Structure formats: C-alpha cells, structure tokens
Image (cartoon, grey):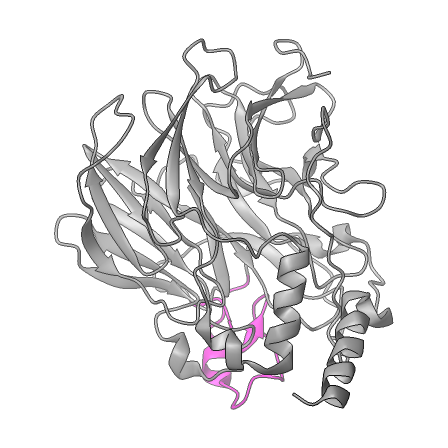
Amino acid sequence: MSTPRLLLAAVLAAATLNACGEMATLPVEAGMGPSPQLPAPNTTLIPTVKTAKAVGWPAGAHPLPASGLAVTEFARGLDHPRWLYVLPNGDVLVAETNAPPKPAEASGGFKAWAAGLVMKRAGARTDSANRITLLRDTRHAGVADTRSVLLEGLNSPFGMALIGNQLYVANADAVVRFPYETGQLRISAPGVKVTDLPAGLNHHWTKNLLASPDGSKLYVSVGSNSNVGENGMEIEAGRAAIWEIDVASGAKRLYASGLRNPVGMAWAPDGKTLWTAVNERDELGSDLVPDYMTSVRDGGFYGWPYSYFGQHVDTRVQPPRPDLVASAIAPDYALGPHTASLGLAWSGGARLPAPFIDGMFVGQHGSWNRNPPSGYKVIFVPFRGNMPDGPARDVLTGFLNESGEAQGRPVGVAIDRQGGLLVADDVGNAVWRVAPASTMAAPQ
C-alpha cells in the first residue's frame, strides 16, 4: 500500500473508531419486546463504530447487581472465558477460547483491516487458549477453590453438553465427544469426531450445543459467514442455522435457518420448546436491527439475509428472494439493537428472589455498531408459561466505566447447583456469581 493510501486508511480508521457522527434517535428500550420500533434504515458511507476499549477490572471492582442481589467472584485469572456448562455434580466447565485464525483477512482489504482494529480494541483479538477448565466449589461457598484443565488442544471450543457418560464439545469446525466419569478432573482420552460443522472464514465462529431433554438429540448453532451475504451465498451453506444431530447415529439435519448468528440456546419450561438468542445484522444505523430471542420452529426460516424481524426487506441483499421473505417468521422478543445478546439460560433451578423467578437470563456482550453503546449487561426477561411476559430487567450492570471503557463483557450465563447465576466475563477474565443479597454478602 502506498504512503498516501496508508494515510487515507489511517484517517478513515480513526474516523470509524470515533463513530463518524451517526447516532441513535431512539432509546435501546424502544427496540425491545414483542413489537419493537423499527425505524427506516440509516446507512452511512462509513459504518458507525463505537467500541469500548477493553481495560479490565481495577482491583476490588466488580459488576453492579440489581436491588436484592449480590455478586461475588466465582473465579478470576481465566483466559478469555466465553461459555459455561454446569455438570450434574456441580462442577462448572468454562470454555477458555477465542476465534480461530482467519487467513482470509490478510487479503480482505481495508474493511477487514479496520474490523481487525476494532476487535483488537474491544479485547476480542487474543490467541485462543483452546481449553476447557473445570472449576469446583468444594465448600459450597460460592467460590471455586479447585481448578484443573479438563481438556486442552481443542479448536476454539465453545458449546458443551453431557449425555450419559459422554461429554460433547463444539469446536469451530466439528462436534467431538470424550468419555467422562463423574468427578473427573482431567480427560486424557482422545476425542471422537461426531460430525463436521461449517467452518472456513468463520465471520461468526462460536458453535453452541444443547442436548434434548431425553438425550437423544443435540442442537448445534452455527452463525453466518458475513453480515448480509456480501461474500456470496455459496459460502453460507449450512450457516445462519441450527442443526439437529441424532446422538446414536451422528446424522444431522437442518432444524431452522435464516438465523444470522444464533448462540445461546435453552429449553422453555415445557421441555419441548427450543429458544435461542440471535445477533442480528449491522450497518443499518444505531437503531437497527434489534437482536432477539425466539422460540424456534422445526423447519422455520427467520429471514436472514433477505429480511429482518419477519418480513422487513433488506435492500442491500442482491438478488432479492421475495419467495423466502414471504415465509420469514418474526421473532418473539427483541433484545435491543446491537446488544450482542449471546448468553441464554432458563431460570429453572435458580434461587434468586422476585422478580427474577420465571424467565430467561440473557448475557449481552455489548455493541460496536451503535452510538451510544448498548448491551454490556445481563438482563432478565420474565415469562408466563412458555412465552415472554413484560419488560426486561437489569441483573448486572457496570461493565462500562465512567469513561466508556469496558471493564468486562458478559457472555455465557448458567445456573449453578446451589441456585446462583454464573456469568462468564471474557474481558474481565472472570466468572461472576449472583445470589440473593440476603444470603451472600457483596464483595468489598
């Protein structure tokens, strides 16, 4: 690249990182609930980028819990902890992981280069530890006092699920299984591949797992390889989807599609209705498009990339597919534009006080494409029966400091065996535990 072009790229990158003037005209709450406001798209020459610089937590600092709750450190000093899984004996598994290398970025042009700067600033460009660590609270005190590496040498692991005596792990490119015995601190046996998963460019690399209540099926979430198919739909084969795997045979089938980046998955109280949290598209302005959580219909199509929130056409996508748009299902509940809602956990088994009793906990990793920022918190969406019922409530906030820097970024959420809420924080390199204030003193 010539010196003038380098200078131009630097100027554009600086402008991009400072959000270039486009701002939200609606509060985040306007883009939440079953019927969010969807204003006209606001596209700009340079997409809005307002990143929170990752700085970590000062000594003694922690997220701020809602009234009636307290938060403590379950574990600190982890390496980019992203996802959590609680074993039946109470041991907590943590995927210490990050994106696999993306060779295509080396020749991806200015946009890919600028995106790399943004991700680095946000703390998302660190080498992946590629391991699953086991945390054990032997004293039932809400603090992990035993830590061991259960599995290592993985490939950007994320989702985990135990079925019988087999532990399933979703790497970036495949689902693998390992033999597991209750109480085991380390697995040395080699993994067995169950099935390949779409990989490659991995614009969205996280692959999550959820077992069916009877253990006969596994559900795997796979994000898209682009924002809105701008790299061609041929590289999107099998992506932006949830797959169903037959555990006995390893055979898989497409369960639902048109889900740009589904990550969190959970079962509703009936044990039959699958729910997922989905990151929607970017670069339509600070007020579009809301991320969402939705029940997932077998065979359902949810719009990506041709439409959003049902049948709102995205005119950037060419050629259009009016036939698919006509079948697009509107999601059940919007979670705010650009909140990066990733974690999802049903409250069953939790022992938190009202109003955090029946509903879904959602980990919102935080925005890069909204000015001012959105997300950077854990929220609770109340349910009545199997459907959302009422506005979301904050559970943990304070992840951004007064300067707008990210002290932490919440990702996975899970309920531990004692009924506390666990939250993986991949910038703070911690797992936080939330419990009733009446039974647990907040850290000083």
Looking at the figure, which quarter contains the C terminus?
A: top right
**Residue 243 left/right relative to 278:** left
Which of the 4 image quarters holds residue 148?
top left
- Check the picture and name the quadrant holding the N terminus: bottom right
Instruction: Identify the main secondary structure in magenta.
Output: loop
Q: Does residue 267 show up?
A: no
**Percent coordinates x, y for residue 76 in the rendering:** 56, 29
Q: Nearer the viewer, residue 151 or 277?
A: 151
Write down the region rendered in magenta: 301-330
Kindly identify the residue that appears in the image at 64 percent across and 44 percent down.
Answer: 409
**Is 305 included in the stretch rendered in magenta?**
yes
At 44% across and 60% down in the image, what residue appears?
A: 205
Q: Is residue 357 above or below residue 230?
A: above
Tell which residue pokes out farthest to the front in this image. Answer: 3
**How far from the left and from the top, in percent, is residue 247?**
18, 48
Residue 215 drawn at (x, y percent): 23, 39
**Tag count:** 0
Q: Does residue 442 lie above or below 432 as drawn?
A: above
> Is residue 102 or residue 358 the one in the foreground?
102
Expressed as whole percent of the image width and height from the top left, the position of residue 251 reads 17, 59
Q: Is residue 316 magenta?
A: yes
The residue depicted at 59 percent of the width and 82 percent of the height is: 109
Q: Residue furthest left?
A: 249
Q: Is residue 56 visible?
A: yes
